[in-house]
């Protein structure tokens, strides 16, 4: 991307329900940037919730739309972007994000994450119809998916506000050092 490192958009990636959207909104507010949630953008285009897009149109079309929308935003400056937990399964998406933005991987331990399962399952088609063991292996296998990042944060036992503040501090340091 052209333009300065300081103006690069910030991307949040990580497993479903880790807090990408909440943290992303907080970081966007603190930096006076606009926030984009890619899942919401996909839902707006289809005028359907994600579960219905998976059911009626299929995951393949969802992934294609996800890739196209992300490709459009990563080339814009000064955004904070939250991408869905499956977006980095596509190499093109991983590369587009890492080449044009600053990518934060929000991580969480399995023990903390599994407490959230019941509130996530209705809106996350990828979790539906799976046993807890299957979900745990998905959780483990996705770790490699998120390995392409600029910075990783373990979110266990931290409030969203604390996570957002530590991201801002890390960004300020990077901007001072590299710009
Ligand atoms: C998915 C994660 C979801 C959403 C879709 C598929 C995935 O986003 O994109 O349900 O495959 O991990 P969140 O990570 O925001 O829940």
Image (cartoon, grey):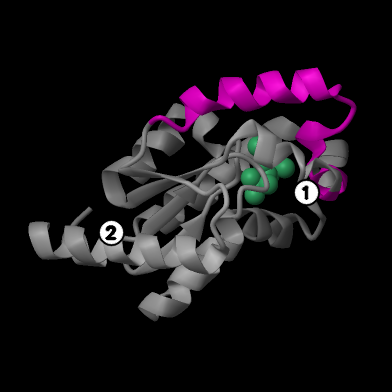
Residue 36: horizontal and vertical position, in percent? 53, 64
Left or right, residue 169 beside residue 23:
left
Quadrant holding the C terminus: bottom left
Q: Which quadrant of the structure image shows residue 137?
A: top right
Identified at 63% across, 60% down, the residue is: 41
Q: Is residue 60 magenta?
A: no
Q: Tag on residue 151?
A: none
Seen in the picture, residue 88 relative to 33 is either above or below; the reply is above
Q: How many discs mark residues in the rendered view? A: 2
Q: Which residue lies under the disc numbered 2? A: 170
Can the viewer see residue 158 in this picture? yes
Can the viewer see residue 36 in this picture? no
Seen in the picture, residue 73 relative to 91 is either above or below; the reply is below
Q: Nearer the viewer, mark 1 or mark 2?
A: 2
Q: Which of 129 and 176 lies nearest the eye of the viewer?
A: 176
Few, some or many residues within 10 Å of mark 2 (<14, 14–19, 20+): few
Magenta range is: 119-147
User: How far apart are labels 1 and 2 at the CA level?
Assistant: 33 Å
Q: Which quadrant of the structure image shows residue 132?
A: top right
Left or right, residue 16 beside residue 87:
right
Circle 2 SS class: helix
Ligand 1 picture quarter: top right
Q: Which residue lies under the disc numbered 1? A: 50
Q: Which of 31 and 58 lies nearest the eye of the viewer?
A: 31
Residue 79: horizontal and vertical position, in percent? 40, 67
Mark sitting earlier along the chain (1/2): 1
Identified at 10% across, 57% down, the residue is: 178
Q: Which quadrant of the structure image shows residue 177?
A: bottom left
Residue at mark 1: C-beta within 8 A of ligand 1: yes
Check whether the beta carbons of the residues at disc 1 and disc 2 lie within 8 A of each other: no
């Amino acid at each position: 991307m052209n333009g300065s490192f300081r103006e690069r958009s910030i991307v949040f990636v990580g497993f479903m329900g880790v807090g990408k959207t909440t943290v992303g909104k907080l970081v966007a507010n603190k930096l006076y940037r606009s926030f984009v949630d890619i899942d919401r953008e996909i839902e707006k285009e289809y005028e359907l919730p994600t579960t219905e897009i998976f059911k009626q149109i299929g995951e393949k079309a969802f992934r294609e739309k996800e890739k196209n929308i992300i490709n459009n935003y990563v080339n814009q400056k000064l955004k904070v972007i939250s991408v869905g937990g499956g977006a980095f399964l596509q190499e093109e998406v991983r590369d587009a994000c890492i080449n044009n933005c600053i990518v934060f991987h929000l991580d969480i331990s399995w023990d903390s994450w599994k407490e959230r399962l019941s509130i996530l399952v209705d809106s996350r088609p990828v979790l539906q119809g799976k046993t807890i063991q299957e979900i745990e292996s998905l959780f483990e296998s996705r770790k490699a998916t998120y390995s392409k990042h600029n910075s990783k944060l373990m979110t266990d036992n931290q409030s969203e506000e604390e996570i957002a503040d530590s991201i801002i501090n890390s960004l300020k340091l990077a901007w001072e050092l590299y710009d």
